[in-house]
Image (cartoon, helix red, strand yellow):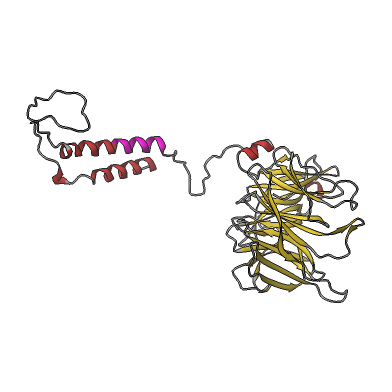
Amino acid sequence: MNLIEDRIRAAARAAADTVAPDSVPPLELPAPRSRRFGRRRRGGRSPGVTWSTWGPRLAPLAAAAVVAAILITVVQVSPPAYQGGPDTVPPTRAAPSTPQGYVASGQVPRFYVQVTVHGAAGKNPAEAVVHATATGAVLAVVPPLAGHTVVRVTAAANDRTFVLEEEPWTAAGRAGTARSTLAILNLTASGRVLGTGALPYTAAGDASLLALAMSADGFRLAFASQPATSRNEPTLTKVTVLKIAGGASRTWSATGDLLGALSWTADGKKLAFNWQSGQSVSARLLDLTSPGGSLLGRSRVSTTLSQEAAQGSTFVSCAAGSLVTPDGTTVVCAARLTPTGSGVPHSASGSGFAEFSAASGTLIRVLGQVKAGTRGWTAMDVLWSDPSGRVLIGAVRRAGRTRVGVISGNRITLLPVSVNPAAPDLGSW
C-alpha cells in the first residue's frame, strides 16, 4: 500500500469515528407545513408553525461530506511519493544564474558592508560603505568615529546589524597604538543607515584584535585578541564573548596562534576558530556554554585543515581560514586539491570549497571544484555560508584578479563586488 492510500484510509476512519452508532435516528418524513418557502428573516418563525429538528438527521450527511472533503484534500495537496529508500532526495529547483536571482530568492543576503579607502592609501581614514549585493550599488557611506579609521567589519545573520572595528588615525595615517574601539551600525530594510554608536569596549593596553564575529541574533559579539609580547615570550591568545547591550563577558585563553575568522553556530552555543599548533592547523569548536577558562580545554578539534580525503587519494589543504555553517554540521574552507596517487600528473589537481563534517572531520563534498590548468577560478577564501553550506559566498582568483562570487554546486556566479588592492576588504555579509 502506498502513502496516498494510507492517508486516505486514515482520513476515512477519523471521519467515521465522529458519528456515534446510536446517533442516527430512523427515517421520518416531516409533517406538511403551511409556511411558504422564501427568505428567512433573522431566523424568525411563522406563528403556529413548528420547525423540525434536523441536526440529528444531518449528522450522517455531514460526516460523509467531511470524508469527501478530506479525500479531495489528500489527493490534491499531498506531494507525490518518491520512489527509493530514505536517502532519496526530491528534485529541487535550479540554482539562479544571476546575482539578482540569488537575492530575489532569499538565498543570499541583500546587503554587505565593505571597508573602503578614498584617495591614496594611508592618507585618508577608511569608511564603511553599504552595498546592494545584487547590483553593487552604494546605499550608504558610514564615516568612522572622530579621529579613527575603520579596519574591520562583521555582520549578524539578520542582514541589518554590523559591528565596525576602528583604530586611532592621524593625518600621517594610523596612530602608533593598536587600541581599537567598536561601533555598531544598524540598517533599515532598504539598506539605509538607521543609526550608529560606539560600543562600551576598548582594547586593553596595547592588545590587538585578530578577528570579530557577531552571533546570529546580533545580541553578542565574539573577538580574538593578543596582548603585545616580547620576542622571547609565548603568544597569548584570548577569545572573549560579550553582550552588545552591556553586561558580563567571558574569556577563554591559550598560548598559541589563532588564524583566520571566527564564526558562530545559529543556536549561539558554539564558536569556530582556526588554531595553529606547530605546522598543523585545525578547526576547533568552542563550547560557549562553558564558564570561560582554557581556550583549548573548552574546545574540541573538529577537523584538520590539511588532510587526505577519506574517500580518495586526494590531499585537501585549506588555503585560508574556515567557517562553521550556521547549522553546525559542516566546516567549510577554500581548498587546494592535489592527487597523491603514483603517476597522477600535477595537472589533475585543482581547487574548490571543501566541506568537512563538524562531528567526524571527514570530507563530505567539494563545491565550485575546478581542475588546475583550465580557465577556471582558484578558490581563495570563504566569506559567508547559508545554514547548511549548500550556498556560499567566496573569493576566487584568475589571471591575477580577485573576484567575489556565489558558489552553488559547481557553479560560480560572480557578484558585482569591487576589490580595491589598496584596501583589499572583500565585504561582510
- Picture layout, residue 241 above or below residue 162: below
Report x, y in % for residue 342. 78, 54
Depth check: give the residue in front, 412 or 188: 188
Q: Quadrant of the N terminus?
A: top left
Magenta segment's dominant SS is helix
- Picture layout, residue 101 above or below residue 164: above
Report x, y in % for residue 81. 44, 40
Q: Quadrant of residue 15?
A: top left
Would residue 340 be seen by someone viewing this image from the given angle?
Answer: no
The magenta region covers 68-78
Tell which residue pokes out farthest to the right in this image: 172
Position of residue 428 in the picture relative to residue 360 (left or right): right
Depth check: give the residue in front, 10 or 68: 68
75 is within the stretch colored magenta: yes
Q: Residue at x 82, y 69 (%)?
A: 206
99 is within the stretch colored magenta: no
Depth check: give the residue in front, 428 or 294: 428
